[in-house]
Amino acid sequence: MSGYSYTYTAIPPARGIHNSTAKITMVVAGARSGKTRASLGGELARVVMLQPGYWRSDIEARVPYTIIVCEPTFKMVRTIAWGTLKNAIPAQNLINENLTDRILHYQGVHGVTQIICASYEQGSEKIEGLSSVYFAFLDEIFQCQQQFYNEVLVRLSERNGRAILTGTPKPALWLEDEVINRALDGDPDFKYITWKTSENPYFPKESLATMRRILPPKIFRRNYEASLESFDGQIYEEFDKSIHAQVWDINPDEYQVIWGSQDWGFSHNGSFYVYGLRDDDQVDILFEVSESGIPPVAAIPGQRCWASIMEEYQNQFEEKFDWIYAGPDRPENIENIRSIGVQIKGADNAVNEGITFVAALMHVEEGRSKLRIHSANCPKLVRRIPTYRWDIDSSGRVTEKPLKQDDDEVDSMRYGLYSQRRWFRIWQKISGGVE
């Protein structure tokens, strides 16, 4: 192994990652800017093979050089981390792999490197108790819980290890306080590296121009210019009643597909909406039922319930009606309603990603928007959207988490639009066809 040759070439803005000697290197870069390729397929692959800082006592005792690799979900471990590492590290150095347990073993220059993959969604149990951890890579760090990050620091402390954190800005005040501000204030243990998507020479300029056009300015700056600016006050800043709230004659033949959404409620409002998708990503919110005290299913024959309301709309639109996307916090409601023949499933409850998608649909360009709400049929939603705001913490700072107050209607809207996103061409542009 003494002849191992490392041939990775970094894109110019990523070179600071490979030169960093800080304990914590924080990489904040735009979407598809090459940050993961540089950090995971570049720097981490080098560490896997060259094993910097490997203690002689561990080498002699044949204790593996342990690295923690973390993604938000197991799916991302499989599709991003696993594949990137295997493509970046010479195959002849692979000793064994176990995707079920998410563990890779490679032969490095001094001994065996053990890579333990974990996900934020499953918590820190997988990494608790690990010893001889020399390095950690935490992807999409803005989605990581502080407790998980703290546990990684504990694992690294035994061997004076280092970590690379990467991400595109999302709400995470703890990260700003514990990492970003320390790096910006000159703490020698922290290094802050940032670049825009436009600095990745491999990202198509025409795609970036499209994103600039279709996304609200603040969201574009966050997603593609790695801006850390706060979203103050109103969440859907571009909402304009004169543009988004209209009255028209509803013709089901105009829609490619019709579907519904449900936010549960009993002591507070439950909210049900019906949507229709027209040509060119034009989406209408057609009908609203937003009331308190409605049970999920009938307790006595003939009782008005959410199941009967859903059935009514499903039957009205028949073959054009797709799924109803319901709040996943009540799986028993979903199962009970599904059992009587309603096409219902749990909604995708990715809050900030959903807000970004709804804001993209709500974006106003030349006086027009892709989103239209029937104001006569959906009066509560029209009233709620302007009052939907970011929460404030005890120190008076905007937390960039939605205020949990009078949010039933807007939550249901987010469930419906984001869960059906694959029908929208705008989603293909935003996601690049990648989940």
Image: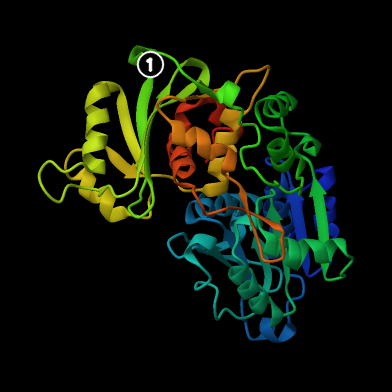
Q: Label 1 amino acid?
A: Ile
Above or below, comparing residue 214 to residue 399 in the picture: above
Q: Position of residue 17 (x, y in %)?
A: 80, 56
Residue 203 found in image quarter: top right
Q: Quickly name the residue at label 1.
A: 250
Above or below, comparing residue 319 to residue 196 in the picture: above
**Residue at the left extreme?**
301
Would you say 307 lies left or right of 354 here?
left
Q: Position of residue 99 (x, y in %)?
A: 46, 59
* Residue at the spot 15% in from the left edge and 51% down from the top edge: 299
Between 402 and 141, the residue placed more toward the observer is: 402
Would you say 220 lies left or right of 311 here?
right
Secondary structure of the residue carrying tag 1 is loop
* Residue at the spot 29% in from the left edge and 50% down from the top edge: 293
* Residue at the spot 21% in from the left edge and 38% down from the top edge: 308
Between 16 and 233, the residue placed more toward the observer is: 233
* Residue at the spot 12% in from the left edge and 41% down from the top edge: 302
